[in-house]
Amino acid sequence: MKRILLLLILITTCIFAGDTLRFAWMSDTHTSGESGQRDLARAVRDINSRADLDFVIISGDLTDYDFPGHIARAKELLDSLNLNYLAIPGNHEYKWTYSGGEEYLRVFGYDRFNKKIDDVRFIGFHQGPLLRMGDGFVAPKDVQWLREQIKAAPEDEKIIVITHYPIDKSVRNYRDILKILRTRNVQAILHGHHHHNAVANYGGIPGILGRSTLARNDAGGYNIVTLTEDSLIVQEKVTGGELKAPWHSMALRDERKSDYEPIEPADYSVNEKYPQVEPLWMTELHSLIAGGPAVTYSRVIVGLNNGDVVALKRRNGKELWRFHTNGPVLGTPVIEGSVVIVASADSCVYGIHLRKGKSLWKVKGDMPFVSSAAVRDGNAYIGGSDGKIRCINISEGTVNWTCDRVEQYIEATPAVTREHVIVGAWDRHLYALDRFTGRLDWKWAGPMAGVLYSPAVCQPVVSNGVVFIVAPDRVMTALDEKTGEVIWRTAEHMVRESIGISEDKTRVYARTMQDSVVCMDATAREPVTLWKTFGGFGYDIGMAPPVEKDGVLFYPTQRGEVHAMDPLTGKILWKHRLSTALVNPVFPRTDDDLVVTTMDGKVARVIVK
């Protein structure tokens, strides 16, 4: 007992010794709801009441989602701090984003930082994932930025890194990040995401997890971090209450550590098991790709996060032209005749000449587009973040009709049938519009109340008057196309947002969250499972759908693989890994020739010998 008291006295003496740097560290404030706003406001008042702090750091998830006005409201609360602060976005601002991740940058003016305070450098960056449900991912442009910032830092300079996710397997390219960080004197990685205080180890770099400001079993709280000449000390501060004894302390190093733990390399051994599968070519576009490719006999069209639309030769992957928009292109382009239809977060839908790469027309929306169009009979149908669904004449670039009955932004690609345009939104509802007039015929919402259960990501599939969807409620639902009434629902397979349909419309496929693909009978009036196959891809919450072509079923995974199966039996035919990053929706032209894009900027044409 005496030894513990002596240790506490020693630590307290260090904390309040003269030459220190002390900051408040908040995380996971989640201010989209009233309780989050209240808890952050109380934490800000608590911080303002203290005279011993130098600045404030916030490690992500300031809001629950990037809906219009939510990020601005979080900044308004933070701006009432009496101290300077540095904040990064978390997965909630980048996954549920009407702006394609642009709103945070617009409101705060930055989404990463490199700030030297006294003798310590603080580097913060975000890890997405942008729009796509899945593991975290540091975009190529941010990896390059981090590499440059770290390289420019003196080797003996003490660095504290701020992220939202940990730097471990929950971030798809964590290996790349650790390799960069381990070249300099990184003392620790401070992050949130898990809402509690804990200590971790990321390849030899100490990790410190910080609590949420939200009041759960207490009044809410945050952490106070003290840096002395040779120590880092963390204490929890209960909002409006006590400053607890230090729960973590560590020595600071003067030089870069040399005994880092080895980083396990990514496992590409699956490619050796199926040597008949190989990329005919692979092109690196050095920008995050969040959508799949559009493919013709001679062209591959891809949209990039940097705002470019790129055309490659299908034969060899060489670039043919590049068209620039003024915002991220996050959906999948679609081709109708000689026109490429693509939407941008600059609030425009573009018609681009397939061969020349020149603008043919532009339709301006009221807010960003983060979605993809569907085409039928010379028209393109697309939903926007302004809550409007538009029917655009592809040859003229004119708007035939607009439906403004949607209450929140639209991310998904519509399903277009002979009679309807069917699409979900982040307002809990699935909408069915008359294809010729845009009149709202019906809308449907599942029984789960929260907007995060919305059927807003998957493109519905339709067979013989039945609409099939899978949503974050982990239920597959079959609805009557004419009325929107439920025919059946099943929670048997823990599906999420990835769904596809067979070429003959008799089978519905869904990739589950738990390492399997399930096939359901699309002709039955009750849920009938035809087969279920475990794929060995692990836990997966990506949204890219299974797609059948010429008697082969293809589906991508968030771990960088494409799998092929027999659609009648579920037998695995082959697997191939292209990357460690999430694979977007794939485009098979035949059963042995497909084009694939990955979130880390790769485009590949994969062939089966």
Image: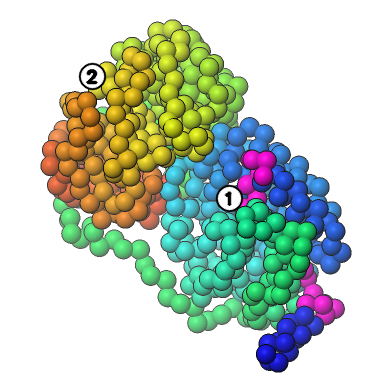
Q: Which mark is residue 90?
A: 1
Identity of the residue drawn at 29% across and 29% down: 488
Q: Position of residue 22 (x, y in %)?
A: 77, 68
Residue ID for mark 2: 464
Pick out the residue farthest to the bottom: 2
> Relative to 490, is 466 above or below?
above
Magenta region: 14-35
The one nearer the camera, 98 or 120, is 98
Q: Position of residue 244 (x, y in %)?
A: 72, 71
Q: Tell me the quarter of the picture where residue 175 sits.
A: bottom left
Q: Tell me the quarter of the picture where residue 150 sits.
A: bottom right
Label 2 close to label 1 by CB (< 8 Å): no
Left or right of residue 240: residue 450: left
Can residue 394 be seen in the rendering of this structure?
A: no
Can residue 383 be seen in the rendering of this structure?
A: yes
Q: Position of residue 73 (x, y in %)?
A: 71, 39
Residue 24 lies within the magenta run? yes
Q: Which mark is residue 593?
A: none
